[in-house]
Amino acid sequence: MFFRKFRGFFSSDIAIDLGTANTLIYVRDRGIVLNEPSVVAIRHEHGSRNSRAILAVGAEAKKMLGRTPGSIQAIRPMKDGVIADFTVTGEMLKYFIRKVHETRFLQPSPRIVICVPCGSTQVERRAIREAAMSTGAREVYLIEEPMAAAIGAELPILEPTGSMVLDIGGGTTEVGVISLGGVVYAHSLRVAGDKMDEAIVNFVRRKYGILIGEATAELVKKNIGTAWEGSEVREMEIKGRHIADGVPRAQILTSQEVHQALSECLGGIVSAIKTALEQTPPELGADVADKGLVVSGGGALLRDIDRMLTEQTGLPIIIAEDPLTTVVRGCGRALMEAEQLGDVFVHE
Amino acid sequence: MEQKQPDMTDTPAAAKGPGAMLRRAREDLRLAPENVASILRLSARQILQLEEDDYASLPGPTYVRGYLRSYAQLLGLSPDRVVDVYQQYCRQLAPPPIETAVAAPTGTMSENAQTARWTAAAVGVVVLLLIVFWWKGRDDSGNTTRKADSTTTYVTESGAVIRDPAAAGGPTESPAAAVSPSAPVSATTPAAQLPGAPAVAPAARPATAAAVKPAVPATPVPAPAAIPAPAATPAAVAAAPATVTPVPAAGPRGRLVLKTTQESWADVRDGRQGRLLYETLAPGRVVTLEGVAPISVFIGNAEGVQLEYNGQPVDIRRHQRGPMARFTLGGETPVAR
């Protein structure tokens, strides 16, 4: 324990957005130093049972997704915002933390702030805490994602006014209303970027009988995806395997079709916002109606999502600056300004 | 919707803020503030405040930036340009609150933190060195004490010389301590007596003898006790219980006799913190020690040891804590610790 504290003196405090799609690390006094996909490639050793070796982590491993031979498995250890494979998540975190401390002589033992979905269970939170501790951290603080997003978006969370935030990540969508440094209402929805990719895969299979991978679906979403039916129409050629013929086929997909594919997921998000507005006390609801809803996360980059949300909810919609890093910036600020921000961390 | 580039040449927009630019673009499109407000779901008042650069009445900078982006997009202006003008305007007005958020990645540690860490590392190294020196010094003083104690001669009750305590009781002390008792023997007894103790390692003898020789004149070992040694056979030497012949020295001294009925380890130190005894004693051994008072005694198996101090029996059980007993014999009455 003492040695951990000693090593901690030579480690920088870090904030981690352990996301389903991407892991971001913010290091005190240095800013965001790592932004890599939460993907790990594992090689299964021949000859010995259950023997696994980490082959690649992050961007390198993501390139292997769906393109691996039998002995290699590219997996995403996070699912729906929580840990799906504890050991691999721990290894991935260790790799990332070592990467941001690569010049250090001693093994790092930092203080870590890590975000968790507000809808995660005690067991899931404990798993995230344990995974962070397994990296050698000397202290681990958990912060709920809506709170981190609000801090990262520089909302006036300490003031007696309601601030509403929507974070559309890879695995979960978080809606939260915050006032006076506390979460008044928060809800986590397991519909987000991954579900949108899945919806596109299903749509293309249903409509054209072509099977595409999740990586292609993600590319479609990023390039021509739109949340608003009135958006400018765009087209993109996709390639996949025809289910009946079994041979590769190319198909032109339009943004209207993608909007059609995404409408169910987007409908779920709109419903979550409306439920949040219903559950919010009227005074805070009035504040939210006056100021608007701040959207962060990768989902905020979906074309014209602000227009769609404005139309559907009647609220002014504000897309956060650099929405992909809002949560990790919030974690970092919570770490650096813990005294000013008060007790924003989760207590088990 | 096509985006028009705002005309930034005719007005010093940075000094004024983006309000005038937005108003002009809105008027060009023949839109009323109410129309814009209904599209953006803001109030007409907020639209006018934006156009008048009256940001104090609006919510925080995050919201203002969001409103400006939406408004610019609606009017076909570049949202980034409008927000840039707003940022510049804010910088001119006051220290920008938006810049206090999160430091941009710089790639280097802040100098203060780095200096503090290097200082801490240097202090750590110095402390480590001090600990090492202290440890080594402690070892050296231990050796010195043993050398001083080496004036004590171990003699069996039958009078035979024991050169190595390991042969008699299996001591657990370090080799240096095990060899030291034999040194005075080799130094003070004739070479002819040595065949009586073949267990002594020849290599150890010269070194220990050299260390003890200067002390010989000051430590008159009772010759009669040592002389019968040659008569003893090696087997007898190994089996016989050991006694220690005290060596007179200056200062108050105490005489301690330990008799073991069961196997027990013992750690006895005198007032100079010199180790008089530090070994595992076999059952049936009788060890006589003499040292400068107070003498601290630490016995591993108190049930199996009887003790006499200056001829008076000591009740060990009074100081017993579990199987062990620890106490100091400093004067008339033993003091438990």
Image (cartoon, coloured by chain):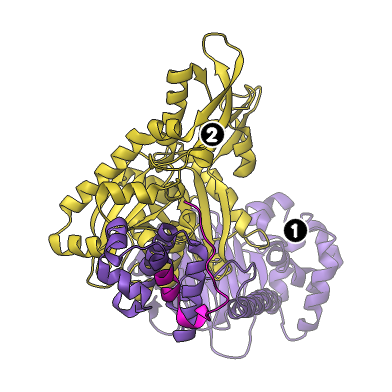
User: Where is residue B300 drawn, in percent x and y?
Assistant: 46, 60
Note whether residue B102 is visible: no
Provide the residue designation for mark 1.
B231
Q: Indicate left or right for B137 with A111 as reference.
A: right
| Magenta highlight range | B1-24
Q: Where does the C terminus of chain A fall, quadrant-wise?
A: bottom left
Q: Secondary structure at mark 2?
A: strand
For label 1, the SS is helix
Residue identified by numbered label 2: A235
Q: Residue at x 61, y 62 (%)?
A: B242
Q: Amino acid at mark 1?
A: Ala
Q: CA distance from mark 1 to mark 2?
A: 113 Å
- At a point 47% along the width and 23% down the height, the residue shown is A204
Q: Is residue B17 magenta?
A: yes
Of the two numbered discs 1 and 2 in the rendering, the one whose residue sits closer to the viewer? 2
Q: Position of residue B123 (x, y in %)?
A: 63, 80
Residue under the image location 50 percent in, 78 percent down: B13
Chain letter behind tag 2: A
Which chain is drawn using yellow? A
Q: Nearer the viewer, residue B3 or B82?
A: B3
Q: Amino acid at mark 2?
A: Glu
Q: Which chain is purple?
A: B
Chain letter of disc 1? Answer: B
Asked if residue B80 is among those painted magenta in the image, a careful observer would answer no
Kindly indicate whether the residues beneath marks 1 and 2 are on one polypeptide chain: no
Front residue of A312/A191: it is A312
User: Which is more toward the observer, B174 or A245?
Assistant: A245
